[in-house]
Amino acid sequence: MYGLEMENLTVDYGKFRLEATMKVRRGCITGLIGKNGSGKSTLIRAIMRQEDGATGKILYDGKPFAGNETEILGKIACVFDSPHFSTYLKPKRIARLFGTIYKNFDMDMYEKLMRKFDLPSDMRLNKFSYGMQKKYCIILALCQRPEILILDEPTSGVDPYDRGNVVELIQEFMMDESHTVLFSTHITEDLDKIADYIVMLRDGKVALDDEKDSICDTYRLVQCPSLTAEMEKGAVGVRKTMFGYTFLTKDRDISGEGVQVKAPTIEELFIHLSGNDGHGDPFSEF
């Protein structure tokens, strides 16, 4: 069962074009990764009907968005890369406004989370630090009691302690198996902890879409002092360092003097798959 399905979702800026066909699985956390400019934020804005020129089809539980926007968007909460409301207002005023817009808005939960993150209610939002604004937007999204939570860089600018709290909140949200999360981030450490699936965008296209554990199990990260012709045959995303070379490979039997092999993290996968230099096609089997 899929929470969201995008079929040929297209946004054309002329110099950049997003073309995405992908599925966000219900009951799972899907991590969305890619370089800056790969289309992550554009994809999220298109899903949330913030891109007027977007074409293609978006489905929620098999039902098309077109003609059902009010019903469907009422079940989705999104934290964009910056607040989509006036930051000149005070948090308590914003919360009251959200309470009139979203019928399921949970004011008790709101007060509890404001205390948890130690955020003031009587200070204008534009006086908050960037990280505080992020935390506040996450609180508002969760208090809408959505079925689908879409997050665009939600932990960017948030200190490590509170980032851990945010990750815990996402995990708590997912205790309801009918809930779904699409989570765009550059902090891939968070995805190592909680993601079930990984979608990678490259140049506006979906280059990778698979289970996180399956992707990590497919490759091994190799560090070696020198790159032999035999190694190079199966090497993906070769990078030269001051200590030698690192690359991904599907070869489980690779060995040699000074060769170190380990399972890659999401960050290591991202670095090598995004920066593939022509050594193999990392996406040929996905």
Image (tube, rainbow, N blue to C red):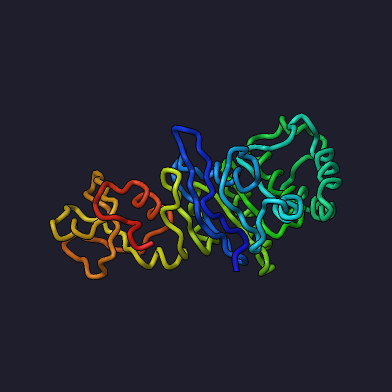
Percent of width and height locating residue 31: 52, 55
Q: Which residue is drawn at the image coordinates 72% and 55% (left, top)? A: 72
Q: Nearer the viewer, residue 38 or 17?
A: 17
Residue 76 vs 52, above or below: the answer is below
Residue 100 vs 1, above or below: the answer is above
Q: Which residue is drawn at the image coordinates 56% and 43% (left, top)? A: 156
Residue 130 vs 110, above or below: the answer is above
Count of marks overlaid on the render: 0
Residue 12 can be seen, yes or no: yes
Q: Nearer the viewer, residue 62 or 125?
A: 62
Percent of width and height locating residue 223: 26, 56
The C terminus lies in quadrant = bottom left
- Toward the left, the furthest residue is 229
Q: Quadrant of residue 208?
A: bottom left
Percent of width and height locating residue 170: 64, 58
Q: Nearer the viewer, residue 8 or 138?
A: 8
Left or right: where 285 falls relative to 129: left
Residue 153 can be seen, yes or no: no
Q: Which residue is drawn at the image coordinates 45% and 44% (left, top)? A: 204
Left or right: where 57 falls relative to 215: right
Residue 140 vs 124, above or below: the answer is below
Percent of width and height locating residue 1: 60, 69
